[in-house]
Amino acid sequence: MANQPLILTKTEITQIHRALLQMLKQSEAKCAMLVDADGKCLAKKGFTANIDTDALAALIAGSFASTRAMAKLVGETDFSVLFHQGERDHIHNILVDNNTILTVIFDDRTTIGMVRLYSKECSKSLKETISQARQKKIPVGKQIQIEKDVEDQLDNLFKED
């Protein structure tokens, strides 16, 4: 789990979207998602309309958490890549950093080799952008205000009429 919240500016979001779109174009994959270790979808591009990206993001994060535990059992720090092969669609996951995962969904119009090559390049670009974003700190007063705003919104959502 990430200790410091990830704060993405409009510029960083644009950089992430450009990197995902470029990777999709080069690899000819169907879609790509950037997922954090908490299971939140940070960004998505491509054909995602028929995919529950929120549920998939949570499952991807869980999969990486269990894989991290398996890696430790066999003496590895981590396994940085996970691949799932289906009859029609395949999922390639690559760690961008300790708290972020790039997920690429593709079919037989491309190859795992193409997806691996371009997702590795994309993850390097994403790592730079995310690293810059993680260096930003929320001022303590602002963080308290954000937490209060979230609590107020939750109270309003669940209050009884």
Image: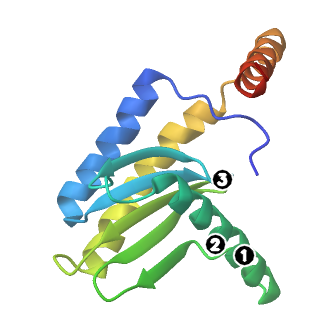
Displayed quadrant of residue 120 = bottom left
Q: Which residue is mark 2?
A: 63
Dot 3 or dot 2: first in sequence order is: 2
> Residue visible at 66% across and 30% down?
135
Query: Do the CB atoms of the residues marked 2 and 1 lie less than 8 Å apart?
Result: yes
Query: What is the x, y in percent for residue 151?
Result: 80, 22
Q: Nearer the viewer, residue 142 or 50?
A: 50
* Residue pictured at 41% horizontal, 24% vertical: 11
Residue 154 x %, y %: 75, 26
Query: Crowding at label 3, few (<14), some or many (≥20) Cα neighbours within 10 Å?
Result: some
Q: Which residue is mark 1?
A: 66
157 horizontally vs 79: left or right? right
Front residue of this view, candidates 54 and 161: 161
First-in-chain label (3 vs 1): 1
Mark 3–mark 1 Cα distance, whole angstroms, equals: 14 Å
Q: Amino acid at mark 2?
A: Ser
